[in-house]
Image (cartoon, rainbow, N blue to C red):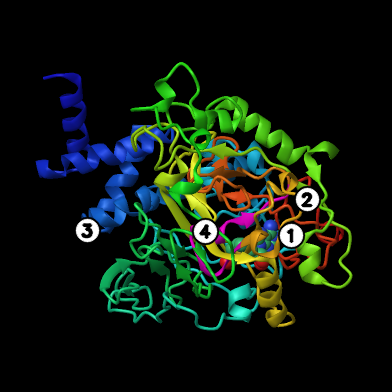
Amino acid sequence: MDSSETFKLERLHVIGVADASKLKRVVKAFSATRALGLHDEEVKPILKKLLQVYDKNWELIEEDNYRTLFDAFFEHKENKGVEDKSKIEGAAGHSSSENPSKRLCLAEPENQTSRLRTMESSSQPCLVDRAESSSQLPCEKGKRSILSHVPTGLSKSNSKKLPYAQEPLEPSGIHFKRENLPTLPGSSEDSSSDHSVKLMVSENGDMHEKLAANSFDGKRPLQYIDDVTKGSEKVKIPLVDEIGNGCLPKFNYIPHNIIYQNGNVNISLARIADEDCCSSCSGDCLSSPIPCACARETGGEFAYTPQGLLTVDFLRACLSRDREPQEHHYVRCDDCPIERSRNKSMPEKCKGHLVRKFIKECWRKCGCDMKCGNRVVQRGITCKLQVFLTCDGKGWGVRPLEVLPKGTFVCEYVGEILTNSELFERNKKTVGNGRHTYPVTLDADWGSEKNLVDDEALCLDATFHGNVARFINHRCSDANLVEIPVEVETPDRHYYHLAFFTSRQVSAMEELTWDYGIDFSDKKHPVKAFRCCCKSSSCRDKKRKRN
Ligand SMILES: C[S@@+](CC[C@H](N)C(=O)[O-])C[C@H]1O[C@@H](n2cnc3c(N)ncnc32)[C@H](O)[C@@H]1O
């Protein structure tokens, strides 16, 4: 018997799996926990206990990339830590006055967290110091123990309403529904049993039973949508609300940008000149010793490695421009389309636009094949992502369910393509009602155009129609995502794709963030000013800092 067979049988024995068909599942669970550096010996008893509690229902353990198993593991660790601590303190003759919930919620800069530390706090990722968070959503307070089934409460009085809760958008393709899920016998409200079972109604109306073990409060349903993309992406993107307090987002999921009305986006093969494509290439352009015509457009080199990540040099150049822009990286238009749409007769002086480094991907007129390494963004989302309700008042956010190496393509920002005037008109109608908008200006190449006409000064608005990127929250200066303009099907750069790549390795369950580039003092900025809760040491929201 070889060592791998011994390993498999050992695990079957340890967790009491008699059926060999479960073997694959056991092995997969251990590979998932090992990928995060957890030791099999420590995971074994937790997995065994979960199988008992869930009556050998593997689906519940496997879903969300073994989320329940990870939660249970870290919860166990945490409880053990507290136990050990009180033993030590008991022996030393004093007790701790520290509130355990505060301990887990200590502010910690994202980029200093170790992989394990981030997972440890990930069951309720909270960067809020409880001492100052009376107006914030509670996170640890209502936590429900998976292994011990001790229900705890979630106080209504100190929960803060989310933007959507305050001002639900007008129906414009409402696709997600929130159900008040009926509690079945055996739920936590039914004290006769310690199994909390809820009937979940998914987007398509299917009903399925789900153990609400991650729900923090027996009275509040844990909200769960299997796939917010409605099957339009290659991967499913679930939505979870572990707090039971979020208003489900009302928007229409679209996987690709779509023109609202007047935006000038002209996609035609005739417009792609020979020098704008690599028609003489074949196979994979990355394997050629000489950069192809598309790579030359990127700056003479490919931006991607054969593994599909951004090259270190390209990422470094983008980050330095993003984080420490020099005066010469800015362009100021003579006749700025943004100022023009704000005040046609007397436009203010242009505030400046950061000229960014572009990636040019191969496309239809190129001779290479679809597997060419210079086609990354056009292949769409491949990472496992999850939309979740943040616990520090930012509303919904996005996190990966797996570790993302530095330079990974995560998703592009998708929305309606609007001209700046259209956006201005749209925003004018919504001024004063507290509604949040989701616009991004496509101004990365405004410097090379003399005077952009109105229908070429574009932006993306994901308020009503958008993809998962609309849920990514802002972080000042040291966000873990960087946005990079990507030219795919149009050679002129007033329209392009805005792609998000990781700026460093991101842990599983760590919130994804990007720097919206907001000047918090600019009251007229298209992104409506909000009080920034990013907790970055370089937070630019001066108001927030003072409070
Ligand atoms: C593009 S949306 C991001 C998704 C949003 N959280 C949601 O629930 O749909 C932008 C809005 O999220 C909120 N937001 C994003 N980053 C934030 C931050 N650092 N601090 C506070 N609010 C934030 C603001 O309300 C902002 O208008």
Q: Does the residue at mark 2 contact the one at mark 1 (Cβ under 8 Å)?
A: yes
- The kind of residue on which mark 3 rests is Asp
**Which mark, residue 532?**
1
Question: Spatial distance from mark 2 to mark 4, Cα to Cα?
Answer: 26 Å
Point out residue 462 in the picture as x, y percentages from the top left corner: 56, 65
Front one among 428 and 155: 428
| SS type, badge 3 | loop
User: Which of the two discs, 4 and 1, labels the residue nearer the N terminus?
Assistant: 4
Of the residues tagged 4 and 1, which is closer to the observer?
4
Front one among 475 and 170: 170
Judge left or right: residue 383 versus residue 460. left
Of the residues tagged 4 and 3, which is closer to the observer?
4
| SS type, badge 2 | loop
Q: Quadrant of residue 195?
A: bottom left
Residue numbers of the magenta segment: 460-476
User: Which of the two discs, 3 and 1, labels the residue nearer the N terminus?
Assistant: 3
Question: Spatial distance from mark 2 to mark 1, Cα to Cα?
Answer: 8 Å
Question: Spatial distance from mark 3 to mark 2, Cα to Cα?
Answer: 47 Å
In the picture shown, does residue 523 fall above or below 10? below
Which residue is found at the position 55% from the left and 61% from the top? Answer: 470
User: Which of the two discs, 2 and 4, labels the residue nearer the N terminus?
Assistant: 4
Disc 4: which residue: 414
User: Which of the two discs, 2 and 1, labels the residue nearer the N terminus?
Assistant: 1
Point out residue 315 in the picture as x, y percentages from the top left corner: 61, 32
State yes or no: residue 188 in magenta.
Answer: no
**Which mark, residue 539?**
2
State yes or no: residue 472 in magenta.
Answer: yes
Disc 3: which residue: 55
